[in-house]
Image (tube, grey):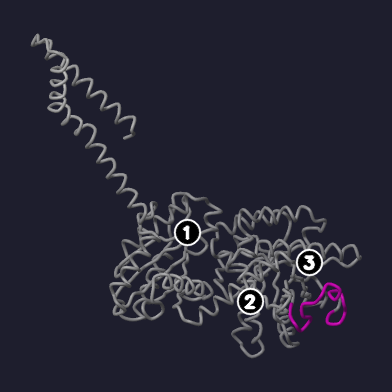
Amino acid sequence: MTIKQIIFRIAAILLVVEAIIMLVLEFMELDLDWISEACVDALSLTIFATPIIYKWVIKPFVLMRETAENRVTYLAYHDELTSLANRAKLLEWLDHSIKTSHGKNNISLILLELDRFKDIQDTFGHAIVDDLIVNIAEKLKCNISGVDLFAKIDTYMLAFVAENTLSDDDIYLKSKQIISIIQTPILCSNGHTFNLEASAGISRFPKDAANKTDLLKYAYTAMRQAKTISKDKISFYTQSLTEVSQRHLTLEEDLRHAVENNEFYLLYQPKIDALTSKLVGVEALIRWQHPQNGLINPIDFIPLAEETGLIIPIGEWVLQEALKQQEIWQKDGKEPIVMSINLSGRQLQVEHIDQIIRVLHLTPIPKKYIDFEITETFLMEDSFLSQMLLEKLHSTGVSLSMDDFGTGYSSLAYLKRFKVNTLKIDRALIKDIEEDKNDFAIAKAIIAMGHTLEMKVVAEGVETEEQARMLKQISCDYIQGFYYSKPVYPYSVYSNDNYTC
């Protein structure tokens, strides 16, 4: 009720009361002086108007205020979408629980982030993400017990507080149960089924932290660690994680500077035809020359670039630099070879893939000499989306390779759905083929399957003559590895030191 409505009601009531008084006076044919009339008016107003004003003005206004205050209080401590407790409620709960426990009771905080949610939001929109969040919240509320507080503290982050936990095993099993529920396929309103993943970090009071701020911070640190774990994705906080986190933040800052200051360069590892030993292509590999710390291993900074989103500008630079080098070779009259460029899963999203296609349209290099390598894991994370995006990329005329094949999901049924031209056998299956009959048999099966599906097969990580011989024996198409050449600078690619051109 607005002030204008209140004033209007009061005026209407007073007008009605005044009319009643005038009718009564006229009926009684009383001729009162102005003072008596005023007294009668006041008395009548007191008798008749006060209950009416209370019922129609004051009471609704009081109820309105109470409703508004209750709503404000509710929103201050709850997430409007899911009705779960929010970050403010979580912090208040932790603060109260810690103060009242006096260090005697164990309190465990599980911080859980829903992986790849931003990618889903960017692809399908906010409505589908909201639908997913509501579905997840309802499933957890119905199936999780032994949790004292369940909160949604960020767009993709949930928190669980368990008081009086008996052991780390108990809280680990609880975390595993929560993740298992989230991993159950969810059918959304758009008819698409999502298979979600989550990472969980756990901190404990009083073992890890003495206050709510540190408890939350340490759970977040553990959660970031969990993201790097391939199995379970559950991590307990330890003091060493703080040191790792500090190094992580320093490296992240340095990586941002590296992007701004162009501290990267590319090396190229040759791919050799297994039968003719001729150079058929190269793989562009990024290197980072840190101004103080020297050469930084890609194993250390590529996952960080993925996590922070810096892989997007880095990936664009790699693409443009590799195509630029290919143009230089072409102008120098070199024999055309295929340039293989690694694409991150983050680059293969709707809002980024168009930029890749624009770059491809601008290059004079024939598209048959451009190959994009995509990890098997990315293809299996969301097969529907992967298929749609790969078809769009493939339509430009480039070829596509599935990298690290044989160590991930290996869902062979999906292979025929994707526009993949080449399989790259992971080096983990190649390094022991001389001694391990099983690895040799698996490599042989992958090559046979690839040929059946009309795909070429590349073996990477080949380091010995015997490995190369065995791969030729089972009809592997291309070989890549130190046996022929390490990654080299552009001017060394066409040399004849290790292979025949």
Q: Is residue 390 left or right of residue 48?
A: right
Residue 137 horizontal/vertical position (percent): 37, 59
Kindly identify the amino acid type of the residue bearing the numbered disc 3. Val
Does the stretch in magenta take in 483?
A: yes
Q: Position of residue 63 (x, y in %)?
A: 25, 41
**Quick one: quadrant of the C terminus?**
bottom right
Q: Which residue is mark 2?
A: 300
Secondary-structure class at tag 2: helix
Instruction: State the residue at coordinates (44%, 67%).
Output: 112
- Tell which tag, 1 or 2, sits nearer the viewer: 2
Number of the label disc, if any, that sits on residue 365: none
Range of residues picked out in magenta = 480-499
Q: Amino acid at mark 1?
A: Phe
Q: Main secondary structure of the magenta part?
A: loop
Pointer 1 or 3: first along the chain: 1
Residue identified by numbered label 3? 338
Lateral position of residue 498 relative to residue 148, left or right: right
Q: Earlier in the sequence, mark 2 or mark 3?
A: 2
Of 280 and 269, the residue lying toward us: 269
Image quarter for residue 397? Answer: bottom right
